[in-house]
Amino acid sequence: MRVVDLLDQVRDRWAERVAHRLARGEKVRESFQDQLVRYFDLMRQAITSGDPGWLNEILDEWLEARTQTDQEDQETSLSPILGHILLSLSSVTRELLNSDDALELISAVLPVHNHALQYSSTKEAETYVRHIANDLEEARATLERLDKSKSDFISVAAHELRTPLTLIEGYSSMLQDIYPEDEDARQRVEIMLKGVDNGITRLREIIDDMIDVSLIDNNMLKLNYQPVWLNQLIGIVEQEIRVITEGRSIQLCIEEFPGYKEMIFADSERLYQAIWNILTNAVKYTPDEGKITVSGRTLPGFVEMTVTDTGIGIDPDDQARIFEKFGHLGDISLHSSSKTKFKGGGPGLGLPITKGIIEAHGGTIWVESDGYSEESCPGSTFHVLLPQRKESPDDQVNTIFSPIDDDLDYDEIKETIAKETSWQKK
């Protein structure tokens, strides 16, 4: 075969040329030249047989010889080496052969070279994808361990803090019975003890929140189902929170809506906690003289409650993060533990706990907002869907995290509500 004869004429100079260009040092060059001669012989066999797959064996060996660092670096591949092989072959053929023979030889080599490029690129891509997949799996496992460690820490810390807190409460109560006889001294002591009591109350709220988060994380939140009327729960929260809203000149508007006065089976204490968290969150992020509106409607199998405020809003990228534990937004250095101050902080557990409570009832919660702006105040609307249970579940007391219907598509329900809400705004 004429092309084979032409290949034999250029082989030695070609191998020497490529080895000199790609390898440094005499010993390395000699070893690499042996590899090139083998590659050349396999290329010769591929051209003779018409099957470029003859090169796969040596390409696999070269790919397997790459280090872990080479595999991580996408720019380190066999393509440059194969490019040098072809360029060196082209230059050597022009030196040793006439133009017609050189053209014939390169024309025969190109299909084999293209196969080598495509094969090595495919294999490298597969290796890189496996490497990335392994990295992602390791990262996922690490995040799971970190999340479990955080949950364990919250649980242990909350329970450990309860004991000294109880002692402080006891001694504070005892001190109240030992007032000094002097009236001025007594008043000073009363003021100090009141400050201690306020601190104890706030600390107990934080500890209780930490314990609730731990229960939710471990699927141990227990619900005591009983007849509940939303209007009664909302009314209780309204009475307690109106003092705060009036102090900041915020208008709190409670609208009657379908399902507002209907009885459902739920855990009244936990629902009260959830509604309180949503409304206090609205207060925190609504400027003075703003407005908060509670409304809702009924949907097939559900009652929907909405809490709309004229506050600073939430960026779309953060609308899922606010339901995560310690999901603070903004500059953490400006954190405030106040529950009622404008943009007050807290530990960032209220909405995650609310989400856990609503989902434990078989419902769902999400937020809609056009974005974040302290100037224009686009506001936010929190949606709460609760199942319209007309009787207690079969396992009535102490039901643990049991949505009433695993087949319900909450995303589809939310999308439908969003479309209807958008149409109503227009």
Image (cartoon, rainbow, N blue to C red):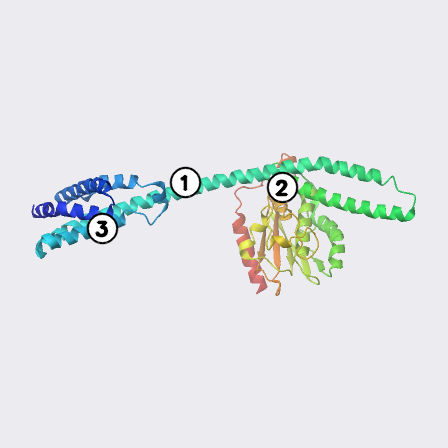
Quadrant that contains the C terminus = bottom right
116 vs 332, left or right, is: left
| Location of residue 343 in the rendering, given as x and y in whole percent from the top left corner | 66, 56
| Location of residue 369 in the rendering, given as x and y in whole percent from the top left corner | 58, 58
Quadrant that contains the N terminus = top left
Tell me the amino acid under the disc marked 1.
Asn
> Would you name the residue on which mark 3 appears?
84
Whether residue 61 is situated above or below residue 421 in the rendered picture: above
Q: Residue 134 — which label?
A: 1
> Would you name the residue on which mark 2 appears?
213
Asked which secondary structure carries label 2, the reply is helix
Neighbour tally class for label 3: few under 14, some 14-19, many 20 plus, Cα within 10 Å? some
Contact (Cβ within 8 Å) of mark 3 with mark 2: no
Instruction: Using the image as rendered, state which of residue 82 and residue 150 is in the foreground.
Output: 82
Residue 398 seen by the camera: yes
Tell me the amino acid under the disc marked 3.
His
Whether residue 10 is situated above or below residue 99 in the rendered picture: above
Residue at the image position 55 percent from the left and 40 percent from the top: 147
Dot 2 or dot 1, earlier in sequence: 1
Tell me the amino acid under the disc marked 2.
Val
| Mark 2 to mark 1 CA distance (whole Å) | 31 Å
Instruction: Using the image as rendered, state which of residue 20 and residue 112 is in the foreground.
Output: 20
Contact (Cβ within 8 Å) of mark 3 with mark 1: no
Residue at the image position 76 percent from the left and 46 percent from the top: 198
Asked which secondary structure carries label 1, the reply is helix
| Location of residue 334 in the rendering, given as x and y in whole percent from the top left corner | 64, 55
Residue at the image position 80 percent from the left and 37 percent from the top: 171
Question: Closer to the camera: disc 2 or disc 1?
Answer: 1
